Amino acid sequence: MKYRYLLALFAAQETKAFLHHRFSQLNLPQINRKILSTFRPGRNYLKSKRQMSDSNFVNATDKGDIPTFDGSEKAKATDFANYFCSYAQLYHQKQMLADHNRMAAYHAAIMGNPDVFKDKVVMDVGTGSGILAAWAAQAGAKRVYAVEYTDMANHASKVMEANGLSDVVTIIQGAVEDIELPYEADGLQSDDESNKHQVVDIIISEWMGYFLLRESMLDSLIYARDKFLRPKTGLMFPSHTTMFLAPIHDEDERKISNQEYNGAMGEWSQFVDSTKSVYGVDMSVLGKNYDREQKEYYLLSSRWAELQPDAVLATPAVVKQLDMSTCTLADSKGIFSGDANSTFTFDVTSSDTGPGTISGFAGWFTADFKSRTDEGGKSAPLLANPTILSTGPENGYTHWGQQVFHTLSSIPLIQGEKTQLQGSLEMTRSKENARLYNCRIRYNSTRKRNGEDQDGKVLMKGAAIEHVYQIP
């Protein structure tokens, strides 16, 4: 019963993105908001998990890694209940398989490059229901090892049998950090006699989470790459990923969040008065703590959004790039102060947008499927037909959407003037749950007349702002 409850909460969070898309298509914002509010328990649950620093159920190792990396049995059990169990449900798999931008990109990357798959050994990390593994087999792979931690592995086996692919695709149930391949039984040979493990020609995986890094599945992928992939000729699908940040106009949603926060604090005030007058106990001493909790929830948690392209107010800034053939576990842990691309400058002019406001920032990512670009991969096969998956507003709906970080106060745009935002982004893992992240955004704003050069007269200079947002 306990695990069913956890599952229902996680389901609510993941399904929220899909329902937001469907109801927004009906152009019924009040109904949209009301319906989505019913999915807050899952989000609240995950939020509470982040604050349980003294809990026996911390979802991380002592080093801050995901539990599948040498975590205790208790940490692994917590990780399974909090994270993996959702992926064992077909409704969750269906949500991802119904994301046609996602599906089209992977299909084009695999089926559009059959020459690199022909007679190759492929590993699919986190195969789920097995569709990427099936495409790899259909593209001509000699062997496909589809790794799946959950009982979804049983469904994947049925899919392979139903599609006549069981002779090519082998389903392996377990964490990729724990499994071994049937080297001798399948005649798998490494290029390096001293390392029998590096027998895989291509690793495919759909590992990306919200704003790319959430879920921290990249750690498992790096482990699989370093252990199993042929280092000089092996390919990663996707091969490169890029994270973007941009200022946005999303004022209606920002105002609703503020209204809900104010409503929650109004209810608290009534509660304090009632408790004192009816029961004789003054609870006002807890007001600051309650205010902090509500601010974190309503104002300082990122929001899933399906933004329209014209909501983006300036050219998006690249805040992190990853080469999947060379990135490290340190790279996977976030964006840190001083990292390349961790700072940004945005120029927003009213002539671009008309009078309006800056409501906050939005983050998203792209995933490229292209040839290797690293020095060590010069002898790797080339992809004749590269493709790209974008989760940005310009590409329409994906189940990832965009993560929106609303500012507590909007920044007005003045006709004939340019507003410049300068700042930085840090993104680090929660100490209590290595699969969740917090974002620290610092910025200040200045205003000049349109056409003024860099050293021109500053009409307004705002105070330095800093907020830490939770990515639920």
Image (cartoon, rainbow, N blue to C red):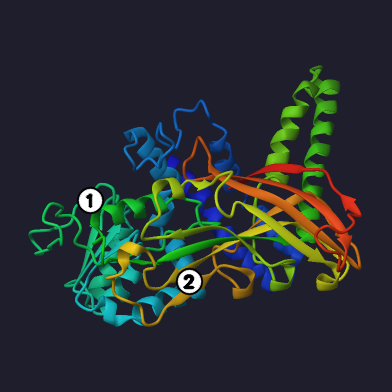
Residue 185: percent from left, percent from top? 8, 61
Q: Is residue 206 left or right of residue 17?
A: left
Mark 2: which secondary structure?
helix
Q: CA distance from mark 2 to mark 1?
A: 27 Å
Q: In this rendering, does residue 229 appear at all?
A: yes
Can you say whether 135 is above or below 237 in the image?
Answer: below
Which residue bears the numbered disc 1? 179
Can you say whether 76 is above or below 304 in the image?
Answer: above
Which residue bears the numbered disc 2? 102
Q: Is residue 375 left or right of residue 298?
A: left
**Amino acid type of the residue tagged 1 in the rendering:** Ile
Q: Residue at x 67, y 73 (%)?
A: 25
**For residue 142, which quarter of the picture?**
bottom left
Q: Is residue 164 left or right of residue 54?
A: left
Mark 1: which secondary structure?
loop
Residue 41: percent from left, percent from top? 60, 46
Q: Residue at x 32, y 34 (%)?
A: 73
Can you say whether 298 is above or below 139 in the image?
Answer: above
Residue 75: percent from left, percent from top? 38, 36
User: In terms of depth relative to the viewer, which is nearer, 71 or 321?
Assistant: 321
Q: Residue at x 51, y 35 (%)?
A: 431
**Amino acid type of the residue tagged 2 in the rendering:** Arg
Residue 100: percent from left, percent from top? 50, 75
Q: Is residue 369 left or right of residue 40?
A: left
Can you say whether 61 is above or below 214 in the image?
Answer: above
